[in-house]
Every structure is written in C-alpha cells, then in structure tokens.
Image (tube, grey):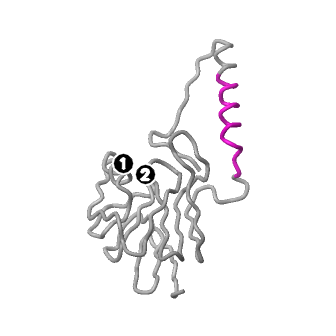
C-alpha cells in the first residue's frame, strides 16, 4: 500500500501517492479532486474550479438548495462511489480498494433507502456526528412504535400534534 496522509483542511485532505483528494470540504483550495458525500449544508462546498466527484442526485439536491456544483465528474479511475444510506443520493468512497471514506452514514434500511455498504479496506476514514458509543440508537421499528403510541395518546387526549423534521431528511 502506498503512503497515506490524512489532515484536517476545511474538510479532510487525503494525499495518497500522487493523488490529492479533499473530502467534504467547506472551501476548496483549487487543487486536487473534491468528493462531496451528500447534500446537507455542512457537507456542501463553496464551489470553485475543482473537479467534484459526487452522485448526480447529490448534485441535483445541492442545486435545489442554491449550491451549484461545477465541474461535476461521476467517475474517476480507481475510485468507487458506494451507497452510504444517509440520505437520498448520499455516497461513500472506496479508493483503490484500500481507503474507505464515509461522511454521515446509516447501516439501517428504511422507507426507500437501503442501508449503507461497508467494504473491506485497509484505511477507514469516518466524518460523522454520532460516532461515539453512547449514540447507539434503538431499532427503527421500536422508534416507530413508540412514536405511534405517543401520537395516539396525544390525539386521544384531544391535544394537537406537530411533527418537525429536516426537509432533506437525516438518518444515522
């Protein structure tokens, strides 16, 4: 395996052999390739002149949110985008079957989204909100049942129910 360097740089900078890759950067330095894992605001960069590897779905959602991704590329030799299961269009990235990066992800299938893929790799890089052990969530069926029970109790008591959520969705 070639030498790998990983640094924080307005995102995650990976230098792997001759490859320079910025993972989910907030700003781009104008150098190397950028990978955008999904269309949540904290993962969308201020678009510069760099080539951006992302899914077509993520590019479309980004544009709808006012962030146009220029220089979109959907394939790069040695790089494989994989489903991360986080939101519609979200992807993780396998580099030369050795380095695996994922931004936020979910291994659970739900509604129309399949759980994320987890390939074998030599180096794993995760950028995620809920990476600590104390953020272990119950099975989705349990959450749905509990939510249904609470809503039913409120309606039965004559109380109004207001549900709030992220417009683009969010699952961990």
Observer-nearest residue: 115 or 12? 115
Disc 2 is placed on an element classified as loop
From this view, report whether residue 5 is shown above or below residue 35: below
**Of residues 100 and 26, the one drawn nearer to the viewer in this rendering:** 100
Q: Is residue 91 magenta?
A: no
Q: Along the polypeptide, which appears first: circle 2 or circle 1?
A: 1
As for residue 148 lying within the magenta part, the answer is yes
Q: Is residue 140 above or below residue 151?
A: below
User: How far separated are the C-alphas under marks 2 and 1?
Assistant: 8 Å
Q: Residue at x 34, y 73 (%)?
A: 29
**Residue at label 1?**
61
Q: Quadrant of the N terminus?
A: bottom right
Instruction: Tell me what residue is drawn at x 52 percent, y 75 percent.
Output: 97
Secondary element type, mark 1: helix
Q: Is residue 102 left or right of residue 50?
A: right
Q: List the residue tagged with mark 2.
A: 89
Give the mark toward the camera: 2 or 1: 2
Q: Is residue 20 above or below residue 147?
A: below
- State the residue at coordinates (39%, 57%): 44
Does 121 sit left or right of 169 as displayed?
Answer: right
* Mark 2 surroundings within 10 Å by alpha-carbon count, few (fewer than 14), some (14 through 19), many (20 or more): many
Q: How many marks?
A: 2
The answer to whether the residue labelled 2 contacts the one labelled 1, judged by CB atoms less than 8 Å apart, is: yes
Q: Residue 146 got which mark?
A: none
- Where residue 146 sits, quadrant-wise, is top right
- Residue 171 on image: x %, y %: 56, 47
- Does the magenta stretch mainly form a helix, a strand or a loop? helix
Q: Which residues are magenta?
A: 136-151
Q: Position of residue 87 (x, y in %)?
A: 49, 48
Circle 1 Cα neighbour tier, 10 Å, few/some/many (<14 / 14–19 / ≥20): some
Residue 145 is situated, as x and y percent measured from the top left of the image, at 69, 31
């Amino acid at each position: 395996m070639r030498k790998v360097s990983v640094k924080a740089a307005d995102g995650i900078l990976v230098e792997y052999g001759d490859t320079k890759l910025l993972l989910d950067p907030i700003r781009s330095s104008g150098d190397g390739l950028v990978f955008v894992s999904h269309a949540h605001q904290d993962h969308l960069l201020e678009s510069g002149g760099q080539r951006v590897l992302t899914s077509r779905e993520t590019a479309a959602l980004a544009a709808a949110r006012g962030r146009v991704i220029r220089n979109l590329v959907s394939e790069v030799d040695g790089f494989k985008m994989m489903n991360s299961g986080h939101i519609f269009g979200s992807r993780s990235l396998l580099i030369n079957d050795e380095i695996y990066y994922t931004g936020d992800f979910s291994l659970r299938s739900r509604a129309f989204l399949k759980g994320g893929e987890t390939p074998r790799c030599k180096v794993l890089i995760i950028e995620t909100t809920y990476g600590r052990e104390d953020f272990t969530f119950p099975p989705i069926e349990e959450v749905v049942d509990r939510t249904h029970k609470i809503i039913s109790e409120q309606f039965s008591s004559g109380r109004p129910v207001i549900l709030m959520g992220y417009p683009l969705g969010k699952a961990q």
